[in-house]
Amino acid sequence: MKFTKQEFDKLPVVDGKRRCPMGDYTDIKKFEDCSFGEHCSFGEWCSFEEGCSFGEHCSFGKGCSFGKGCSFGERCSFEEQCSFGENCSFDFFPIFLLRANLGELPPNLCNELMHKDADSHPNPQLFEGWAKGGNCPYSKGLERLHFFNQRREDWTTEWSPLKTSDLLLQICEAKKWNINIPI
């Protein structure tokens, strides 16, 4: 179902949170670059266009997709495989991004995340075979840790793991996402 701004405004508020069923909220963009207040909750597979702004404590289901320039307040939560457009900004240090759908990444970050996936796999040695053209070690019902476009050609045997905060900062820089880190 595709929601209009008027339909969105009529959705029920329960315990201080607007309850938004699964649907397409992209038409709301037509109404002043959509702005959602605090405590909004969105179901699986939501889609939002450019310039959306979300307040504190918003919750988004798995597979949500956000366009360029979206901004998110503190304590927003995102389930795995959400994707974010260029120039999105976060008012917090977004550890959840390690479970987001990161899409294309530069070779060094692709290699880093492939090694982190291998490190969390029960048989990490299978990744060497995968890099040479074998089957993906995660193809047999195991869930991978990171979601991004893996490229065999980016795999190297040399790996010096990045600190998690450094990895997040490099991902945000590569994706052109902004983080407002309170210090």
Image: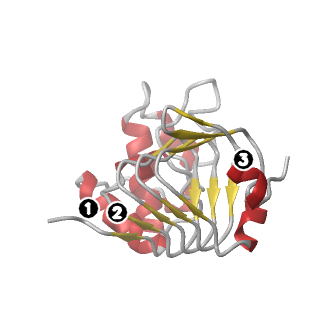
Dot 2 and dot 3 residues touching (CB under 8 Å): no
- Confirm whether residue 151 shows in the render: no
Residue 91 is marked as: 2
The amino acid type of the residue labelled 3 equals: Lys
In the rendered image, which quarter is residue 90 located in? bottom left
Residue 45, relative to residue 109: is it above or below? above
Please provide percent x and percent y for residue 8: 71, 52
In the rendered image, which quarter is residue 150 located in? bottom right
Residue 31, relative to residue 61: is it above or below? below
Residue that carries the numbered disc 3 in the rendered image: 10
- Confirm whether residue 52 shows in the render: yes
Give how far apart the Cα atoms at labels 1 and 3 are: 43 Å
Residue that carries the numbered disc 1 in the rendered image: 166
The residue lying at 31 percent from left, 58 percent from top is 92
Side of 163 where 114 appears, left or right: right
The amino acid type of the residue labelled 1 equals: Asp
Q: Secondary structure at mark 1?
A: helix
